[in-house]
Image (cartoon, helix red, strand yellow):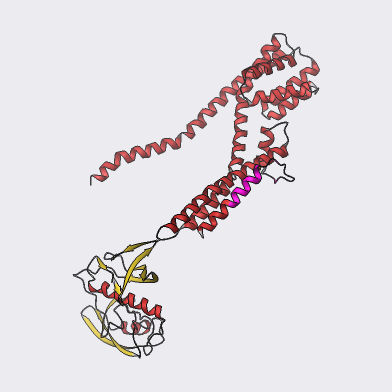
């Protein structure tokens, strides 16, 4: 099953990656979230939003398919490893539960002549040598009469296990059972009808005590023969032989299993728990979650652009103020800034927006409209104010433009100083978690030797 899921996952991932690798335009692109759509428009001004959404979806699907491919390969390797090695580990003895841990049910597989016979063994806890079962009281007789039947209709026809209680909670009494034929009904109430051809009477004596008083009651149970197949008879015999070994010395920490049943060698193995389905679920969940990573990356890039624009704004305004003050026109100053940016060969979101405006001016767009569009694309209040300022002064003239730019430069540097303080506070908050983890490591290093010395 695991191999089939792994192969199917690999086929789906490979086919999907091949289809996404083809340079073909989608006839219809699935929609993206409003936050992602806004981030795409903000990060890619002047570009086709349809193509950018298509690229985002390709990244999302490829992320999920790569994770699916890797997880499917792991599932396939695990499946081959399980088939190439034995799923069982042979055992020779069973460890008993310690006193107070209660009974335990152990699933075993008995192998006889390469044929597997699954069975479940109930192992009782190790009995302390100095303890005796408490004795029962007479009031518990009526309760025992109702409960002893277990799944049987009456004691005249006993086919399933009887319920032999050792303690009655309602009356705080204890019961000690004496059975005249433990080969048919053992002290736990299990019925053994192996080899029984006709019904057989078994007397069960319940000695009930409370304090210093005690009284015995006899329950007559008629064990009916079972109708078993050959396989069921063999399993019953194995269970009976194991139970005899288990009851031979109930004070021992472990006991050996019978190595031969009916002249045939028996090998016992504990089945390994197959939790491959958890890995399958994990692969699918990771593949789905990875499809959201490109969305988060786009949103993070939008935040980084906003921060970069805020940091670069005072520098842009001061350059415009300096160049215009030296005698250049607004457009000449704009082109000079773009020329210096191209020679620097670095990437900056703010200057990329200015470069887009330069291209718009070069294509014949009116200056005022281009500067206004520049402020709207940047979205920050400073850029909107700068775009509006340049647009208005083109209409009114550049007489007071230099003074306004000088005032805006001073205000921009004040805003940048406040923004730097905000970033420093955020950085301190981000460092809080690593500092707490380091504190825990230091505490463990200091406390562990003291604990180990006790």
Residue positioned 67% across, 27% down in the render: 381
Where residue 251 appears, as percent x and y from the top left, is 22, 69
Q: Nearer the viewer, residue 161 or 7?
A: 7
Residue at the extreme left of the image, as rendered: 130
Q: Quadrant of residue 60?
A: top right
Where residue 275 appears, as percent x and y from the top left, is 45, 58
Residue positioned 78% across, 24% down in the render: 369
Residue positioned 55% across, 52% down in the render: 284
Q: Quadrant of residue 386?
A: top right
Count of numbered badges drawn on the protein: 0
Q: Is residue 227 above or below residue 245?
A: below
Where residue 388 appears, as percent x and y from the top left, is 74, 23
Q: Nearer the viewer, residue 41 or 17?
A: 17
Residue positioned 57% across, 55% down in the render: 8
Q: Quadrant of residue 415?
A: top right
30 in magenta? yes
Q: Is residue 258 above or below residue 438?
A: below
Q: Is residue 115 above or below residue 289?
A: below
Where residue 121 appears, as percent x and y from the top left, is 34, 71
Q: Nearer the viewer, residue 71 or 410?
A: 71
Drawn side of residue 270 relative to residue 129, left or right: right
Q: Nearer the viewer, residue 69 or 438?
A: 69
437 in magenta? no
Q: Which residues are magenta?
A: 11-31
Drawn side of residue 202 relative to residue 381, left or right: left
């Amino acid at each position: 099953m695991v191999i089939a899921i792994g192969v199917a996952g690999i086929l789906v991932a490979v086919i999907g990656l091949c289809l996404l690798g083809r340079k073909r335009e989608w006839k219809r692109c699935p929609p993206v979230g409003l936050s992602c759509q806004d981030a795409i428009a903000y990060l890619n001004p002047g570009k086709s939003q349809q193509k950018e959404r298509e690229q985002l979806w390709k990244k999302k699907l490829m992320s999920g398919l790569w994770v699916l491919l890797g997880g499917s390969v792991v599932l396939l390797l695990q499946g081959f490893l399980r088939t190439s090695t034995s799923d069982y580990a042979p055992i020779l003895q069973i460890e008993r539960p310690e006193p107070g841990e209660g009974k335990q049910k152990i699933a075993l597989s008995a192998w006889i002549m390469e044929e597997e016979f699954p069975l479940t063994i109930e192992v009782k806890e190790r009995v302390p040598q100095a303890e005796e079962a408490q004795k029962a009281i007479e009031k518990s007789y009526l309760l025992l009469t109702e409960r002893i039947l277990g799944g049987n209709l009456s004691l005249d026809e006993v086919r399933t296990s009887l319920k032999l209680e050792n303690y009655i909670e309602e009356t705080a009494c204890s019961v000690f059972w004496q059975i005249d034929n433990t080969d048919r009904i053992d002290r736990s109430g299990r019925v053994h009808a192996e080899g029984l051809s006709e019904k057989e009477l078994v007397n069960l004596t319940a000695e009930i005590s409370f304090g210093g008083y005690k009284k015995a009651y006899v329950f007559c149970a008629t064990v009916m023969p079972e109708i078993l197949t050959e396989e069921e008879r063999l399993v019953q015999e194995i269970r009976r032989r194991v139970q005899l070994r288990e009851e031979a010395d109930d004070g021992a920490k472990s006991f050996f299993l019978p190595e031969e049943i009916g002249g045939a060698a028996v090998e016992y193995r504990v089945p390994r728990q197959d939790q491959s389905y958890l890995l399958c679920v994990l692969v699918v969940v990771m593949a789905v979650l990875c499809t959201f990573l490109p969305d988060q990356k786009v949103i993070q890039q939008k935040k980084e652009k906003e921060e970069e624009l805020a940091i670069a704004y005072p520098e842009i305004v001061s350059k415009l103020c300096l160049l215009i003050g030296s005698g250049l026109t607004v457009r000449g100053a704009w082109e000079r800034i773009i020329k210096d940016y191209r020679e620097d060969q670095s990437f900056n979101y703010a200057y990329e927006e200015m470069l887009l405006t330069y291209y718009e001016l070069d294509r014949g767009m009116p200056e005022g409209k281009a500067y206004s569009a520049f402020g709207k694309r940047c979205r920050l209040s400073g850029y909107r104010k700068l775009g509006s300022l340049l647009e208005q002064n083109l209409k009114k003239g550049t007489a007071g433009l230099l003074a306004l730019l000088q005032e805006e430069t001073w205000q921009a540097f004040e805003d940048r100083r406040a923004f730097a303080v905000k970033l420093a506070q955020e950085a301190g908050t981000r460092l809080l978690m690593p500092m707490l983890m380091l504190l825990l490591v230091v505490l463990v290093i200091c406390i562990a030797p003291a604990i180990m010395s006790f």
